[in-house]
Image (tube, rainbow, N blue to C red):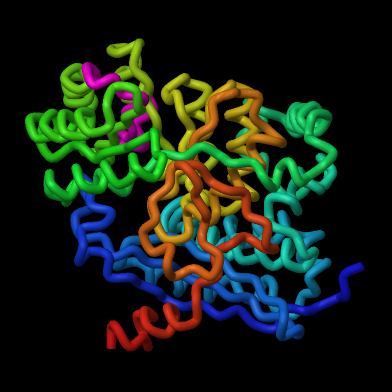
Amino acid sequence: MCVTMKIIDVIVRDIRFPTSKDNIGTDSLHIDCDYSATYVTILTDDNNLSGVGLTFTIGKGNDLCCKSIDYFKDFIINREIDELEKNLLFIWYQVTDHSQLRWVGPNKGVVHLAAAAFFNAIWDLISKYYNKPLWKYVLDLQPEELLKKVSFSYINDVITEDEAIEIIKEKKKIIPNNLDVLESTIFPAYTTAAGWLGYSDEKMKKLANEYLQKGWTHFKMKVGQDIERDIHRCDIIRNVIGNENILMVDSNQIWSVKDSIENINELKKYNILFFEEPTSTDDILGFRKIKDAHPGEKLATGEMIQNKILFKQFIENNSLDFSQIDSCRLASLNEIIPVLLMSSKFDIPVIPHAGGVGLCEYVQHINIINKFLFSNNTFFLCEYADSCSEHFENPAQIINGSYVTPTKPGYSVKIKDNSLNKFDYNTGVYWN
């Protein structure tokens, strides 16, 4: 039985890694990415127990997320952890529907990113309190108990709590009794690390060959510079990986709907699994026009879909084929789980976005939760990009191009102390 413990403080740090020096993360619109984390630590009166969480940004604006969390602290300081767990959804609404801060959203932008970091840290704290990896803590909850922690606001016209309970109950019937089976599950992944837009042809070829040798079979590359250059880069990657391996492309929102229709027509000859973010990530009708123009091609989006309401519309309008939830764009599991449930109801495969600081560490848990609690789809895949993994105490592990299920307690994003001290934007030795 867990001993009662109390939250005594919340510490927020602005952590930035200088990845722009190596063109890591570069795409059609983001050309100087310094992978960054709004990094939250929840301290308790037990020195051996703390919760850590983060949200991912690419540099400037990280400080704004940090500042937002200062307004959330009072909602949890001096609360006992079991009380925090019991009232998790109420606190989530206090933050996401803050009567003044919601005006600069609502449920989107800087404040929502900050809410993700804050609640990611809370989920980490609670799962460590029970000495379980996050995925196991969630799987062990009874359906009614789990759904008391998640938000159905504005989406119960598409999925109700009763429907959600039935989905979970049916899935729980086939969860293996021996959870060692889950702990040994290896979840298939694709790599983005060979195809950043700022990489030279030579670097792309070299990295693609290296990943092939490591057992990777799924590759994603960035496009959107100009269509002739995109064709040239697709030629290079397809020639390296061969026709037997899988290729995806990501234009990161730069094309108009008209451009997307024309450019997909040029690139589809490369046998593309999906075209990611072909146009504005808010353009639900535009995505549908692209799909109607190319009924044989698949569209993916989600890393910039800012809340569950927009996901509801994309899914119900059949405007996407793959749901790419982001563990730091949505406001933590309280909002992610309803999106997984909607994706399950409409039989949309979930391929989480994981190109950024801590995202691979987060999605390794979400993949398992989705596979064993929600999805009936048989297609499973997840992004992986190893940028900055060296800074984590327990980074996501990959074997033969697949995720290995994490087994240590928590949500897996604790950054090493020496990395925090070096890359803290305010006090770190690198920046100062």
| Residue drawn at point x = 46 percent, y = 29 percent | 322
Q: Is residue 47 above or below residue 170?
A: below
- Given residues 361 and 325, the one toward you in this image is 361
Q: Quadrant of the N terminus?
A: bottom right
| Residue drawn at point x = 29 percent, y = 22 percent | 243
Q: Position of residue 247 (x, y in %)?
A: 31, 29
- Given residues 235 and 129, the one toward you in this image is 235
- Residue 305 seen in this snapshot: no
Magenta segment boundaries in residue numbering: 268-285
Q: Quadrant of the C terminus?
A: bottom left
Image quadrant assignment for residue 63: bottom left
Q: Position of residue 168 (x, y in %)?
A: 76, 33
Left or right of 90 in this view: 265: left
Left or right of 218 in this view: 70: right
The residue positioned farthest toward the left in the image shown: 228
Image quadrant assignment for residue 424: bottom left
* Magenta-colored stretch includes residue 381: no
Left or right of 197 in this view: 50: right
- Given residues 359 and 163, the one toward you in this image is 359
- Residue 190 seen in this snapshot: yes
- Given residues 380 and 168, the one toward you in this image is 380
The residue positioned farthest toward the right in the image shown: 1
| Residue drawn at point x = 39 percent, y = 70 percent | 64
| Residue drawn at point x = 17 percent, y = 50 percent | 203
* Magenta-colored stretch includes residue 284: yes
Q: Position of residue 377 (x, y in %)?
A: 60, 23
Left or right of 249 in this view: 386: right
Q: Position of residue 82 (x, y in %)?
A: 83, 67
